[in-house]
Image (cartoon, grey):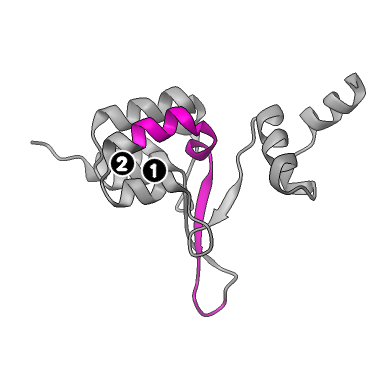
Amino acid sequence: EIVQLTFLQSATCATMSLTGVSEILCNLITGHSRDVNYDESPTQILLDIESSKWQECVDRSETHPEEVRTWVYRLDSESKRERLWTALPIHAALLFQSPASVINAFLKSYPEGVRQRDGNDNLPIHIACRHIDPD
């Protein structure tokens, strides 16, 4: 069992052919996040961000913290291969100018999110600086 756990901890979920519960367990053990296609299966937390349902975002980050570290991407409609964008919920929340309570909840659920670059190579701080409302 120790050998299997060590293997899981050193493997990346991207190289393992896992689905469903196995993928979630791998993500929890290794600390890796998963990717979902926005057009096929967007996370509820991203839908809440887009709808400015801020309290729902805070609540969801507490009940489903795995969604806070789930990367969401959108593919080019023609090629279906090239990613138009890739982001974590913290990137999206800053883009949509969410209140500080949402950002704080996301940071509590996934502190490493502040060190993650989106598909345009932006850290969350870069997005915050461009989209902050000075008032």
Q: Is residue 77 above or below residue 74?
A: below
Q: Is residue 103 above or below residue 40?
A: above
User: Any magenta on residue 31?
Assistant: no
Image disc number at residue 66: none
Which residue shows up at 70% across the image and 30% down it? 30
Q: Which residue is mark 1?
A: 91
Q: Secondary structure at mark 1?
A: helix
Q: Which residue is mark 2?
A: 94
* Image quadrant assignment for residue 80: bottom right
Q: Position of residue 70 (x, y in %)?
A: 53, 43
User: Any magenta on residue 68?
Assistant: yes
Write down the region rendered in magenta.
57-79
Q: Position of residue 96 (x, y in %)?
A: 27, 47
Which residue shows up at 25% across the image and 46% down it? 52
Which residue shows up at 28% across the image and 51% down it? 51
Quadrant where the C terminus sits is top left
Q: Residue furthest left?
A: 135
Quadrant where the N terminus sits is top right
Q: Amino acid at mark 1?
A: His
- Dot 2 alpha-carbon crowd within 10 angstroms: few under 14, some 14 to 19, many 20 or more: many
Q: Amino acid at mark 2?
A: Leu
Q: Secondary structure at mark 2?
A: helix
How far is mark 2 from mark 1, CA to CA? Answer: 5 Å
